[in-house]
């Protein structure tokens, strides 16, 4: 009885304490609506990184807000109200309902940028009358931009860059008299730019680029005299550039690139006397470059590339004393380069390639400015290289290929230690190669092919320690021998010296780990092919055709895991071709022209060469017994493993990436009829890919991956990186449900199917180009904006899906890599060797992605007809190929899009080059296709 009384007293005491604490918290909550609102906001968000871990209630100083000590929260001096909220880059997700913000009446600055918020943006935030800065950039807000912005009468900055807004641009923003910064770029806004945007009173920064805007650019924009920075390109307008934009006299930066504009460049731009950067590239502008642009002496960057401009470079450009970048590439311009260009004191980048320029380059080019990058390739220039082109010691890329240059290479180039890339191929240079390679500390790429050089390859080439690519092919009078240290160069990947009349023996293969391509056909090389070639583990191609080599073909070649091309034809090899599968896959053409060579795929060898085979019959039985025993052990081990997995399926866990509504692993397993959740194994969940309907009603696509328990930590890290890769041209990963043996990765299910289902549907050129650009940008994001880089691994038409706007999105990215890693024994202790191997594997996969992209481009251009771009397209003249593509897509010879088609075909050809080191990066491919300041690789 006494014990019962004690228990009753204990329960009563605890109840009293609980009621007291609850009452206290309620009282505090009533006095502190800000803390309560923020806690409510936190409860609605997904926070995988636990960025808001310090957002919890704790009693503090009376009269002060508890939330003032929280990360991202800034209060006034008395800590009685919240004046700023900064949640930027905290990896938050979910949908903002916005009702919590009603209490923040004194909020001045709200920044929720660089997160994963989705859904419609809450219009309630526009009732915060004190707000001066609103940054919602780099999220995934969708739908129409909310109306009712008139309540933000004090707003100065509105940044909504990189979201998924659609519909028309909000007109009523133009009524905001204090607005200085407006950034609505990188969404899906459509329709015309409102004429009302010409009535901004204080606007200084306007960015509308990268949307789906159309129609004419309104001339009313010229009325906004306060704007200093305007970007409205990367849309699809109609008509010409309004001449009244020349009235925006405060402009310092103007970008209307990639905007489908036609007509001429307005002469009235000469009124923009403060303009520092003018970007009009990738349009359809025609006519001559206005002489009047030379009056804009403040210009630092001028890019008019990739248009249809004609005529010469204006002599007036000699007055642009501040000019650093001059880009006129990919036009139809003619004439000589004015001497005045060489006198510009600040010029560091000169891009005039792919025009019809002629004459000699100015002799003083490089004497008056620190030139860094010169590309005048694919023109009709003659004469020699200006002697002082590198006299200021800053030149790092020199591109002169495909011209008519003559004379000897200037020895002064050897003093240009900053050079990284030299391309002088396809000219008529003669004489010795004068370079002192020991001075080239950073040189990685040099192409001197298709010239008339003599005197052999300099012996000190091995002293260029960073050299990766060397091509001297098709210099028939070169002569000499291969430098003995060539294969020991620590970074050399490509060595091409075909048709050079080289003699002597092949140097011994030592330390040739990075070498992937060796091309030495049509020379006079003698001697044998050493078995030490097997040390070149990265070797993918070795072409020794058309020499005088003798001896047997070394069987050690079969140890090269990446070898894809072997050509030993037209030599004096003898004996039997080794009976390894690798040698048979090369085909007969790899061995023809060797009279004493036999064996598959050539004629059968004489019986005398194979009589010894019977002597080995007795040795076969022990091998077979060993194999049977091994198989038996493997079967037993497999049965044990299956029994263990059946007995212990492990504890299921769920990780939701940003943007996925919260639900449990049990919810998912029930919705997908997973075999691990029920005793009945359905055919659906046995599949590696299937669909599931979540408890929220969302249909998702599910990828099934088997893995080992010891690898889970590492593989989850990789999958989380994939889940955080957000781009409008990628299918979003939503989450992963896993145990010790299997993982189900969930990602968006797109409604409009994949490209393989629609590839044969005939589309207009504009739609095809949009699809190609979208694929390229998604792949570029994986390769260059994710760290570490994510190889797609399986880029093909069936893995390109379409969203509701028919925008292409890449699916299945990274899964091949994850599946490969899941088969590795353990990652608990990654050695340096393993890490290097993984990095090398990644680099190889990235180059394979580039090749797949080129193949996919050809597939799109031909409506699904496989072109086998790596073979057929490189055997066919480029002009013939371009003509076929244009006819296939209805692009006529006078069509304004022919230049665009030519560029796409050229990029596809570059991407499908057989030598991976010759392929561009996806970053370069995107720049060549569409990006600002396109660059020749």
Image (tube, grey):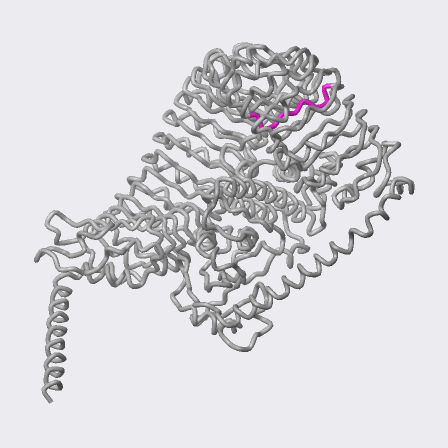
The quarter of the rendered structure image containing the C terminus is: top right
Q: Please tell me which residue is depicted at 65% across the width and 27% down the height of the picture.
A: 495
* Residue 632 in sight here: yes
Q: x%, y% of residue 396?
A: 51, 22
Say whether residue 593 is left or right of residue 455.
Answer: right
- Whole-percent x and y of residue 88? 31, 48
Q: Nearer the viewer, residue 146 or 911?
A: 911
The image quarter in which residue 22 lies: bottom left
Classified by dominant secondary structure, the portion drawn in magenta counts as loop
Q: Is residue 167 visible?
A: no
Residue located 44% across and 28% down the image? 268
Identify which residue is drawn at 32% across, 59% down. 122
Question: Residue at point 56% right, 35% down?
Answer: 928
Task: Compare residues 770 and 349 and report the one nearer the observer.
Answer: 349
Quarter occupied by residue 840: top right
Q: Residue furthest left?
A: 62
Q: Nearer the viewer, residue 784 or 575?
A: 575
Question: Which picture quadrant has residue 422?
Answer: top right
* Residue furthest right as drawn: 607
Look at the image and give the residue range highlighted in magenta: 467-475
Q: The N terminus is located in which quarter?
A: bottom left
As drawn, 121 above or below 600: below
Where residue 406 appears, as percent x and y from the top left, is: 67, 13
């Amino acid at each position: 009885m006494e014990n019962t009384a004690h228990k009753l007293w204990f329960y009563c005491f605890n109840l009293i304490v609980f009621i007291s604490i609850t009452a206290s918290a309620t009282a505090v909550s009533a006095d502190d609506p800000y803390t309560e609102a923020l806690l409510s906001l936190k409860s609605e968000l997904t926070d995988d990184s636990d960025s808001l871990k310090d957002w919890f209630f704790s009693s503090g100083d009376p009269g002060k807000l508890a939330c003032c000590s929280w990360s991202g929260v800034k209060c006034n001096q008395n800590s009685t109200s919240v004046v700023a909220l900064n949640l930027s880059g905290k990896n938050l997700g979910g949908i903002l309902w916005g009702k919590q913000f009603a209490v923040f009446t004194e909020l001045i600055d709200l920044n929720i940028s660089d997160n994963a918020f989705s859904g419609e943006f809450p219009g309630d935030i526009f009732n915060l009358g004190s707000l001066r800065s609103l940054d919602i950039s780099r999220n995934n807000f969708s739908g129409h931009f909310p109306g009712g912005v008139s309540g933000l009468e004090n707003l100065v900055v509105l940044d909504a860059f990189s979201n998924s807004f659609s519909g028309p641009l909000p007109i009523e923003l133009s009524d905001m008299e204090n607005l200085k910064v407006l950034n609505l770029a990188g969404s899906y806004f459509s329709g015309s730019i409102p004429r009302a945007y010409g009535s901004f009173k204080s606007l200084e920064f306007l960015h509308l680029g990268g949307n789906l805007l159309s129609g004419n650019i309104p001339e009313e924009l010229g009325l906004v005299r306060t704007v200093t920075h305007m970007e409205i390109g990367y849309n699809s307008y109609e008509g010409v550039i309004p001449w009244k934009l020349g009235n925006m006299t405060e402009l310092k930066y103007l970008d209307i690139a990639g905007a489908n504009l036609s007509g001429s460049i307005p002469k009235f731009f000469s009124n923009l006397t403060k303009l520092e950067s003018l970007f009009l590239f990738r349009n359809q502008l025609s006519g001559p470059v206005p002489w009047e642009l030379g009056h804009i002496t403040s210009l630092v960057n001028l890019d008019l590339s990739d248009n249809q401009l004609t005529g010469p470079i204006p002599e007036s450009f000699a007055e642009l004393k501040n000019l650093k970048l001059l880009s006129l590439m990919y036009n139809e311009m003619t004439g000589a380069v004015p001497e005045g260009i060489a006198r510009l004191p600040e010029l560091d980048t000169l891009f005039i390639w792919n025009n019809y320029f002629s004459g000699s380059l100015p002799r003083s080019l490089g004497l008056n400015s620190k030139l860094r990058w010169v590309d005048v390739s694919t023109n009709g220039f003659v004469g020699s290289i200006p002697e002082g082109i590198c006299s200021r010691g800053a030149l790092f890329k020199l591109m002169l290929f495909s011209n008519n240059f003559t004379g000897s290479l200037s020895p002064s180039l050897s003093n240009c230690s900053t050079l990284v890339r030299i391309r002088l191929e396809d000219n008529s240079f003669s004489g010795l190669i004068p370079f002192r390679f020991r001075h080239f500390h950073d040189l990685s790429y040099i192409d001197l092919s298709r010239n008339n050089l003599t005197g052999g390859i300099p012996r000190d080439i091995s002293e260029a320690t960073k050299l990766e690519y060397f091509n001297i092919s098709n210099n028939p009078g070169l002569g000499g021998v291969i430098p003995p240290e060539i294969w020991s160069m620590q970074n050399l990947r490509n060595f091409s010296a075909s048709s050079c009349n080289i003699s002597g023996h092949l140097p011994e293969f030592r330390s040739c780990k990075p070498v992937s391509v060796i091309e030495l056909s049509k020379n006079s090389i003698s001697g044998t092919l050493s078995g030490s070639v097997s040390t070149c583990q990265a070797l993918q191609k070795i072409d020794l055709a058309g020499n005088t080599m003798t001896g047997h073909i070394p069987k050690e070649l079969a140890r090269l895991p990446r070898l894809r091309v072997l050509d030993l034809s037209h030599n004096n090899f003898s004996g039997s071709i080794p009976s390894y599968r690798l040698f048979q896959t090369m085909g007969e053409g790899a061995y023809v022209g060797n009279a004493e060579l036999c064996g598959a795929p050539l004629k059968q060898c004489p019986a005398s060469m194979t009589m010894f085979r019977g002597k080995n019959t007795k040795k076969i039985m022990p091998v077979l017994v060993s194999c049977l025993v091994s198989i038996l052990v493997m079967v037993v081990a497999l049965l044990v493993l299956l029994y263990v997995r059946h007995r212990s399926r492990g504890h299921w866990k769920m990780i939701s990436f940003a943007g996925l509504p919260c639900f449990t692993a049990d919810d998912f397993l029930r919705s997908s009829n997973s075999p691990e959740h029920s005793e009945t194994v359905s055919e659906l969940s046995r599949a590696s890919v299937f669909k599931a309907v979540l408890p929220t009603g969302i249909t998702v696509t599910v990828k099934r991956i088997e893995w080992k328990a010891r690898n889970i930590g590492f593989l989850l890290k990789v999958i989380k990186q994939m889940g955080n890769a957000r781009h409008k041209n990628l299918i979003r990963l939503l989450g992963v449900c896993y145990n010790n043996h299997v993982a189900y990765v969930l990602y968006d299910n797109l409604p409009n199917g994949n490209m393989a289902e629609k590839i044969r549907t005939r589309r207009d050129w504009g739609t095809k180009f949009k699809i190609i650009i979208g694929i390229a940008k998604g792949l570029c994001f994986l390769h260059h904006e994710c760290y570490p880089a994510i190889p797609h691994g399986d880029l093909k038409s069936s893995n390109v899906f379409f969203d509701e706007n028919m925008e292409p999105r890449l699916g299945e990215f990274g899964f091949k890599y994850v599946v490969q890693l899941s088969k590795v024994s353990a990652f608990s202790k990654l050695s340096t060797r393993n890490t290097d191997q993984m990095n090398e594997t990644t680099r190889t996969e990235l180059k394979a992605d580039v090749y797949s992209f080129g193949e996919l481009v050809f597939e799109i251009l031909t409506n699904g007809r496989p072109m086998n771009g790596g073979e057929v397209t490189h055997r066919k003249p480029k002009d013939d190929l371009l003509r076929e593509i244009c006819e296939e897509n209805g692009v006529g010879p006078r069509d304004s899009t022919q230049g665009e088609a030519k560029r796409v075909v050229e990029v596809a050809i570059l991407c499908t080059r057989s030598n991976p080191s010759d392929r561009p990066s996806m970053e370069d491919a995107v720049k060549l296709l569409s990006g600002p300041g396109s660059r020749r690789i």
